[in-house]
C-alpha cells in the first residue's frame, strides 16, 4: 500500500469530534475538516507551490487576451507544525532547494475552515494550491457561466471581461459580415461575473479570497488545482449535510442581495426609448392590449448617440431636455398610473459632456502611468472611467445619482459595464490596477447601493448590474445576464441565460433575469417573432420580466410588432403577475436560506443522478419546474422530471419521475408544479386556462 493511500485510510479513521483533523505520516499528511479530506500532501504530490511571474493583458473593447510569463515555480515539499489544537493548526511550508517559505494557518471560524497564507517575500506573486476532489462529483459556480454548468473536467479562467460577441460558431457570420473582428469574439468561459467560488455535489464548497487573475483546473479526477496570480490571503472551505445547507453556508459568508421592492413583481418592465411621446404611445398600446406594466425602462433618458454599432446613449448623467422636455413631471404622471420609471447609468463619462469636464478638473478619472487620463473605447468611441479607488470621486458620483436620478423620481436603473478597467492604469489609491480590475464592478455596485441608502430609498429603488465579482452579492439589488445574441445558439443565445443564472445561484446571487428577446443585433442576426415569443415565455418564469429593444431596434421584432405578438406578450405578463405571491415567498426563502429563486434541481433532488445532466431547465422556487423551449420550430418538448408528483401547468395532467414529451406550442412553455406544493391552488387557477396560443404564424 502506498504512503498516499495509507494516509487516506488513516484519515478515514480520524476522530471526527474535532472540526480540524490532522494525520501525519513521515513527510506526508492529510488534513480534514468535518470529516471531509481537504489537503493531502506527499513529497511526490505537494499541495502547495509558489512562484514569480508576469502577465500581458491586451484589451480590445473589454475583451482580454491574457498571457503568462512564468519566471520561477517553487515546490514547497516540506512542512513543520508550529501549533496544533482542536480548532487551529499552524504550519510552515518550505522547499528542499529554495529559501522561500509560507506560513499557513488552518483555523475554524464561524463553523468554516479558514486557511490563511502569509509570506514575508513580496516578490512571490504566483501560487498553486491542490485540494482534494472526488471522481464522481459535480462542480458548480465560478460566477456566471454561460456555456458549461457542471464544471467537472473543465479549466476555468476567472477574469471580469466582456464575454464576447458570439462565443463559438455563432460568431462566424458576424465576422464574415465585417461587423466585428476576431478580438471581439469570446470563449466558452469568458464572463462579466466570474467568482472564485465553487460548490460540489457532495456538499462542500471552496472560496478564494483574492481579486487576482486565477485559473481553476478541475480536469484532474481527484484534485482541484487552483492557480492564482498572487499569494491569496485566505481560502474558505466548508462541508455540510445537504445541498441547501451548503448554499446557506456559502451565502452566509459571501452575503445576499438586498431585498427587492415588491413593485418589481407587478408586471413587465417595458424597455422603450425614442422620446417622451413614443414612450407614452407604447405604454398606452400595451395597457389597451392587457399587458401588465409595472415599469418602463427608458435607457435614453440622458440622450442618444447613434454609432455604427447601433442606437447607443450619451453618457452624461442628467436628463435630456429634447427627448424628455419635462421628465420629472412625466415620471409623476406615470407613477399616478402605477408605473415606475427606470433609467440607465454606467461608470463611463462622455468626453463631450459637462460631467466629464467637472470630473476631469477634479482629478476623479482613471489615469495612465504618465498621468494623462485613460480614455477607453467601449464600442466605437472613447470615454473616461471614474476612479472608484478615489473616495472623493465616489462621493461625487453618488451625489450625481442622488441629484440627477433619484430626486427627479427614478425608481431604478441599469448600472452597466465595469469590465473595462485597464490593468496598466494608475489609480488614485496607488493600488495595483491588475488586482483592482476584478474589484472594480464590486465597488460600482457598492456605490449605487450607498447612493440609494443615503437618499433613504432602500427597499424602494432597484438597480441591476451585469458585471461582478466576490462581494457583488452584498450590494447589487438585481443581476441581469448581459448581452446575448438575438438567436437560438447554445453559445450566445437564448439558452445561455439559464446556466448563467443557475451558476450565479451557487455564488450567493438570488435575483437574476435577462433581456427578453436578447440584445446583440449584428450581421445576419436579427430578432425573429418566434425567438421573442419563446424568450418572453422564459422570462415570465423568472424573478423579473423586462424587455430590451436591442442595439438596432428597427431590425428587431418587438413586443408590439404585430397583434399576435402583443396578445402573447400580454398573456405571459398576466401569468407573471399571478405568480407574485409565490415569487415573494421564494424571495423570502432566499433571504433566509440563500437558495436562489432560479435554482438547480439537484438542490432538492440530491439522490437523482439524472438532474446533473440538465443544463437548460430549472426550478423557480421549490415548486415550479421550468423547461424553456430554446430551439425554433418546436411543437413538443422533452423534459426530465425528478422524483416527485408533478402537474402540467396548462392542463393539470399528472406526471411522475422520468423523461416526458409534452405539447409545447407557442404560449405553452413546459412548466410543471409539484402536487405537494402549498401553492397548488394558485398554480391550477392562476395559469391553466383556455386562452393559450396554440400556433405560430
Image (tube, grey):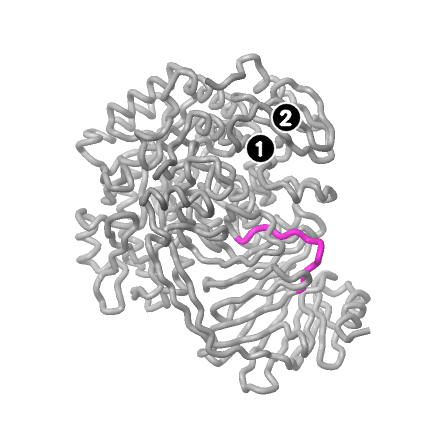
Residue 678 has which mark? Answer: none
Vertical placement of 157 versus 256: above or below? Answer: below
Residue marked by disc 2: 679
**Relative to 350, 590 lies left or right:** right
> What residue appears at the point 48 percent right and 39 percent down from the top-left corner?
489
The quarter of the picture where residue 323 lies is top left
Query: Residue lying furthest top in this view?
Result: 690
Mark 2 secondary-structure assignment:
loop
Prevailing secondary structure of the magenta residues: loop
Image label count: 2
**Relative to 678, 334 lies left or right:** left
**Relative to 6, 489 lies left or right:** left
Membership of 217 in magenta stretch: no
- Alpha-carbon neighbours of circle 2 within 10 Å: few (<14), some, or many (≥20)? some
**Relative to 644, 404 lies left or right:** left
The percent position of residue 375, horizontal first and vertical second, equals 24, 57
> What residue appears at the point 71 percent right and 81 percent down from the top-left corner?
27
- Alpha-carbon neighbours of circle 1 within 10 Å: few (<14), some, or many (≥20)? some
Q: CA distance from mark 2 to mark 1?
A: 10 Å
In the image, which residues are magenta?
A: 132-142
Q: Is residue 479 visible?
A: no
The percent position of residue 666, horizontal first and vertical second, equals 52, 22
Residue marked by disc 1: 585
Q: Is residue 13 visible?
A: yes
First in sequence: mark 2 vs mark 1: 1
The quarter of the picture where residue 655 lies is top right
> What residue appears at the point 66 percent right and 55 percent down from the top-left corner?
204
The percent position of residue 68, horizontal first and vertical second, equals 44, 69
Vertical placement of 323 versus 601: above or below? Answer: above
Vertical placement of 587 versus 28: above or below? Answer: above
Amino acid at each position: 500500500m502506498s504512503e498516499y493511500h495509507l494516509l487516506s485510510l488513516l484519515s478515514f479513521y480520524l476522530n471526527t469530534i474535532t472540526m480540524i483533523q490532522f494525520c501525519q505520516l513521515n513527510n506526508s499528511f492529510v488534513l480534514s475538516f468535518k470529516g471531509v479530506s481537504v489537503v493531502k500532501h506527499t513529497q511526490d504530490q505537494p499541495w502547495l507551490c509558489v512562484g514569480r511571474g508576469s502577465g500581458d493583458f491586451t484589451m480590445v473593447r473589454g475583451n482580454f487576451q491574457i498571457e503568462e510569463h512564468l519566471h520561477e515555480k517553487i515546490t514547497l515539499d516540506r512542512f513543520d507544525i508550529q501549533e496544533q489544537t482542536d480548532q487551529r493548526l499552524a504550519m510552515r511550508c518550505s522547499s528542499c532547494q529554495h529559501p522561500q517559505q509560507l506560513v499557513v494557518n488552518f483555523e475554524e471560524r464561524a463553523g468554516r475552515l479558514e486557511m490563511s497564507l502569509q509570506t514575508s517575500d513580496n516578490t512571490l506573486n504566483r501560487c498553486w494550491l491542490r485540494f482534494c476532489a472526488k471522481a464522481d462529483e459535480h462542480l458548480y459556480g465560478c460566477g456566471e457561466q454561460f456555456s458549461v454548468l457542471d464544471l467537472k473536467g473543465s479549466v476555468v479562467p476567472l477574469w471580469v471581461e466582456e464575454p464576447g460577441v458570439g462565443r463559438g460558431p455563432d460568431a462566424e457570420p458576424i465576422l464574415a459580415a465585417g461587423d466585428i473582428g476576431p478580438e471581439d469574439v469570446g470563449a466558452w468561459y469568458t464572463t462579466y461575473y466570474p467568482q472564485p467560488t465553487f460548490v460540489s455535489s457532495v456538499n462542500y464548497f471552496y472560496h478564494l479570497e483574492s481579486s487576482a487573475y486565477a485559473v481553476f483546473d478541475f480536469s484532474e479526477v481527484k484534485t482541484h488545482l487552483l492557480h492564482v496570480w498572487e499569494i491569496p490571503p485566505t481560502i474558505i472551505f466548508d462541508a455540510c449535510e445537504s445541498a441547501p445547507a451548503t448554499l446557506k453556508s456559502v451565502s452566509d459568508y459571501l452575503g445576499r442581495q438586498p431585498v427587492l421592492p415588491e413593485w418589481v413583481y407587478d408586471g413587465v418592465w417595458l424597455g422603450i426609448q425614442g422620446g417622451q411621446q413614443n414612450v407614452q404611445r407604447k405604454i398606452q398600446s400595451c395597457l389597451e392590449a392587457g399587458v401588465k406594466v409595472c415599469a418602463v425602462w427608458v435607457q435614453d433618458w440622458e440622450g442618444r448617440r447613434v454609432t455604427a454599432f447601433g442606437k447607443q446613449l450619451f453618457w452624461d448623467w442628467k436628463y435630456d431636455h429634447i427627448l424628455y422636455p419635462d421628465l420629472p413631471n412625466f415620471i409623476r404622471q406615470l407613477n399616478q398610473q402605477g408605473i415606475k420609471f427606470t433609467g440607465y447609468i454606467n461608470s463611463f463619462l462622455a468626453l463631450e459632456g459637462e460631467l466629464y469636464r467637472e470630473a476631469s478638473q477634479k482629478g476623479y478619472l482613471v489615469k495612465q502611468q504618465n498621468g494623462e487620463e485613460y480614455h477607453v473605447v467601449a464600442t466605437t468611441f472613447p470615454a473616461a472611467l471614474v476612479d472608484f479607488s478615489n473616495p472623493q470621486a465616489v462621493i461625487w458620483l453618488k451625489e450625481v445619482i442622488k441629484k440627477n436620478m433619484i430626486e427627479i423620481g427614478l425608481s431604478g436603473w441599469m448600472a452597466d459595464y465595469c469590465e473595462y478597467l485597464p490593468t496598466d492604469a494608475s489609480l488614485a489609491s496607488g493600488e495595483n490596477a491588475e488586482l483592482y480590475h476584478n474589484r472594480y464592478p464590486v465597488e460600482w455596485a457598492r456605490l449605487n447601493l450607498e447612493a440609494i441608502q443615503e437618499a433613504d430609498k432602500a427597499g424602494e429603488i432597484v438597480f441591476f448590474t451585469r458585471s461582478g465579482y466576490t462581494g457583488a452579492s452584498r450590494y447589487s439589488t438585481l443581476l441581469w445576464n448581459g448581452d446575448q445574441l438575438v438567436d437560438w445558439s447554445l453559445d450566445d443565445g437564448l439558452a445561455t441565460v439559464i446556466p448563467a443564472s443557475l451558476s450565479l445561484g451557487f455564488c450567493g446571487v438570488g435575483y437574476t433575469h435577462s433581456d427578453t428577446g436578447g440584445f446583440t443585433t449584428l450581421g445576419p442576426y436579427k430578432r425573429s417573432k418566434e425567438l421573442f415569443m419563446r424568450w418572453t415565455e422564459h422570462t415570465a418564469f423568472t424573478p423579473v420580466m423586462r424587455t430590451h429593444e436591442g442595439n438596432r431596434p428597427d431590425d428587431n421584432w418587438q413586443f408590439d410588432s404585430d397583434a399576435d405578438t402583443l396578445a402573447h406578450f400580454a398573456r405571459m405578463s398576466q401569468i407573471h403577475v399571478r405568480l407574485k405571491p409565490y415569487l415573494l415567498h421564494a424571495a423570502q426563502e432566499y433571504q433566509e436560506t440563500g437558495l436562489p429563486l432560479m435554482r438547480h434541481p439537484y438542490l432538492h433532488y440530491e439522490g437523482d443522478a439524472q438532474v446533473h445532466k440538465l443544463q437548460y431547465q430549472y426550478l423557480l422556487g421549490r415548486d415550479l419546474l421550468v423547461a424553456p423551449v430554446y430551439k425554433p420550430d418546436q411543437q413538443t418538448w422533452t423534459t426530465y422530471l425528478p422524483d416527485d408528483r408533478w402537474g402540467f401547468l396548462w392542463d393539470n395532467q399528472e406526471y411522475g419521475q422520468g423523461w416526458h414529451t409534452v405539447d409545447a406550442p407557442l404560449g405553452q412553455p413546459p412548466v410543471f408544479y409539484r402536487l405537494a406544493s402549498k401553492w397548488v391552488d394558485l398554480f391550477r387557477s392562476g395559469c391553466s386556462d383556455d386562452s393559450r396560443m396554440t400556433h405560430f404564424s
